Image (tube, rainbow, N blue to C red):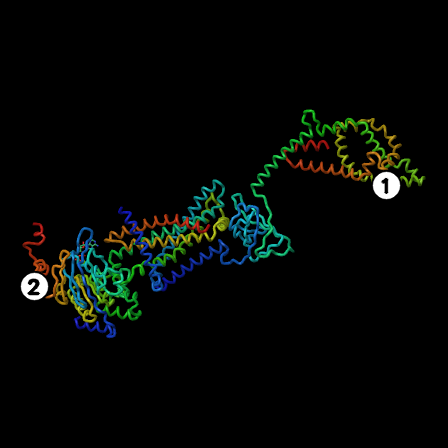
Amino acid sequence: MNHVSQTARVGLFFLLGLALTWVTFQTLNGGKVFRDKGYRLVAGFESLRELKKGDEVRMAGVVIGSVEETRLAGRRAEAVLHIDRTIEIKRDATASIVMAGLIGTNYIGIDLGSAGAPPLPAGAEIRTQITPDLNTIMTDLAALGNKLDHALVTLTGSLAGDGKGSVGIIQKIDLLVTENRASLARTTTNLQQVTDKLNRGEGTLGKLINDPKLYDEMIGTLGEIRRGAGEAKSFIANAQAIIDQVKMGQGALGALVFDQKAGEDFKSTIANFRAVSDKISRGEGTLGKLLQDDGLLRDAQLIMKKAQRALDGLEDSGPITAVGVVARGLF
Amino acid sequence: MKPLTAFLDGFGSTWLLLVRVVSHSGSLPRQFHRFIDQCYLIGYTTMPIVAILSFFIGSVLALQAGYSMQNFGTQQFIGSLVGLSMARELGPVMVAILVAGRVGSAITAELASMKVYQEIDALETMNISPARILVMPRLAATLVMMPVLTIIGDLVGWFGGAIVADLTEIISIEPEAYFAVLRRYTHFSDVLNGLIKAELFGFAVVLVCCNIGLNTRGGPREIGAAVTRAVVVSLILILVLDYFVTQVLMLVSS
Amino acid sequence: MTCSQIAEQRNQLTPATTPKTTAVHVSVEHLSKNFGATAVLKDVTFSVAPGEIFVLMGPSGSGKSVLLKHMVGLELPTAGRVALDGHDAAAATTRERVRMALVFQSGALFNSLSVYDNLALYPREHRLFNEAGIREKVMRTLQILSLENAVDKFPSELSGGMKKRVAIARALVMEPSLMLYDEPTSELDPVMAATISEIIATLREEYHVTTVIVSHDRELALGIADRVGILMGGTLAMLGPAMALRSPQDPRVADFMNPKINLQHPRFKQLET
Ligand SMILES: Nc1ncnc2c1ncn2[C@@H]1O[C@H](COP(=O)(O)OP(=O)(O)O)[C@@H](O)[C@H]1O
Ligand SMILES: [Mg+2]
């Protein structure tokens, strides 16, 4: 072999080596050393945890740089981020340490920030956010589980009583209904009769037509009633659920409704209608107060909502489904 | 006592040879043809065996790692294992061992026979330094060719690992996933680390082989003995040096 | 080829403008050399004058080659020294001061180089001429030694005699001021041996080079030597002008110079008794 071709082969071989090195360099490092055209940002954290030099910086999952340096600065830890030149980071963007895997790989995640915000200049400090790391989450979750358990035990106890003399909520309601059976029945029937009368317009309708004074008075009353009824509607709607349950004949309430004698006081209710309505419009008596006093109603609604939410919440949790069934059966 | 003095003798004469080579390094441009000849022998003709061996080293690495990693279901990290092992350790060490066996032995055989047949003496009476025309071109060629061989070895090893990881049923890692993990955990600094190692190994091996060849005494029978000694000393040297160089490189890079 | 023809060619080879290298004075002073327990040279003292042709003779194994190696600094003396123009031959710097050439007994050709490159190595490495000048000089030298056809051959393709001639040619190309030959004619046919003798003699005339020849060749010794030394058992058994060889006093030397083949009483049988 002559010298020229040997030199050529050696030369080509060497160039091949250089090319392969270059390709390897480009693929593994993205040519970082020679393309150091990015800028730096400082991110301060309480703890950098597993974050180390060379870890990625990502924005919306896209790698936009790397952690160039980690250092302790006073009472906090700082990570110097090397960000690609072409990437603009908004002033209100926040950086957080994100865990990519269970084996301890982390990266810095930066959110997009708001579109209109000005970009952070080189060397600036980026806002940071503490995200719980896996260990914290695990501990918190365990603590939460314990608390929930505890809460459920208490809840069950207060609902049903602990069987040692103290009375649970359900039992209390039962007791209340039983004791006030008569008055409750009367009130309910009266209310029914009032509405019936009103619907039919019986008797009163003639008077309304012949007596303008009464008419006026009646109109006003009706207006007030209607307003009161409107306000009471949600109350009634809620009560409807109870009534449905009651119709199924369960508990003391069931017994109350199916007591035939309950209709006796229908007439006296009509007679008292005027007085009642007057009282109502004056805001006297419980119902009146209930209708007139917004605060009371709101409170009632709030209580209902709270109860509803509590129930919704309870239904979602597996272990307390039994309680949920009980509660749903009740109301 | 005799092995100790022989060791010290070899150690000292190796350093002296290095000093002589360095003192002649100015005349390297005039040794261009010898340099190219040696590049051809050390680099070009060694490349196929480096490629073959690295391919199977990478394959076996992937196979064994995959076999043990599937116990933990972590075989998706095979790329990083093969990538780092080849780049930092096996690539340079394998190339150095091949160079010791293929190039180092040939160098010792050639120089020992030159010594035994008085060619070295002839050079000395001609006032032509053997260090200059025999050792320096070989060392320079080694320095130029070791990184080339090593990067080829690294890459071929990586591909060998990728193919095995893909085709072996218990591993079954797609090449894309393999190289994604490899890229993620292997940095160019690891490759560079390996290239530096290879450079040092190659240099040490060729220097030692030259020195053993030049210090051969006696007849043709000694040529064989010198070659054996050169290869054994080279292999020990590579592994001992590997430990210390790795330590130093870790210190430097941290 | 006659002596005058060679001289003519040598004249063509070297233009008159070439500066003559100054011949070297060689002085061997109380030189002793031991290899382990065996003493090869025992307190050898003699000197070779500048431009002189000194022939060293002696039975094989008497230490002639070892003595030559001391003159070029390839062996280090156990005691005494060899001085070249006053500089110790063993010192590394001496080779830079004195251009010397040793024709090894075995030739010591560079086996990896062609005959041409073997000859061209020295002038190339020391940048004596440009490549064209080197080619001219190498080709002429090869021509003188009838080696034109071997120019592109490798040493392994040459016969023993050809190797010897290439080794001599390689030494000639160097144009040294101290020329040492270790048995230059031992493997050559009588005509080539005579040619070599003629070349050696002519060189001295041309360059005034100091020459030391180790040889068993009586023709050569008697023909071209100024002085002769005979080494026996590590010491000089005789030292004197070449003419003294014709009538040696020492019986050992006499036997060495004119061995009678005695089939009735062979020497190896005398040794047994
Ligand atoms: N390197 C060596 N080591 C040991 N002994 C040697 C060495 N070189 C020569 N000798 C011994 O020195 C003696 C002289 O050798 P040498 O000078 O080659 O003989 P000759 O006179 O035939 O050239 C021999 O007995 C040989 O065995
Ligand atoms: Mg001899």
Subunit bearing disc 1: A
In the image, is the residue at mark 1 within 8 Å of ligand 1 by its beta carbon? no
Subunit bearing disc 2: C
Marking on residue C247: 2
Q: Residue at x 88, y 32 (%)?
A: A272
Q: Is residue B237 left or right of residue A191?
A: left
- In the depicted structure, whether residue A235 falls above or below residue C81: above
Picture quadrant where residue A296 is located:
top right
Q: Is residue B166 visible?
A: no
- Tell me which amino acid carries mark 1: Gly
Mark 2 and mark 1: Cα distance apart in space? 170 Å
x and y percent of residue C248 in the render? 8, 62
Nearest to the observer: residue A100 or residue A188: A100
- Tell me which amino acid carries mark 2: Ser
Give the crowd class for mark 1: few <14, some 14-19, many >=20 residues within 10 Å.
Answer: few
Q: Is residue B219 left or right of residue B102?
A: left
Q: Residue furthest bottom?
A: C16
Q: How many marks?
A: 2
Q: Is residue B52 left or right of residue C128?
A: right
Residue to which mark 1 is pinned: A223
Quarter in which the N terminus of chain C is drawn: bottom left
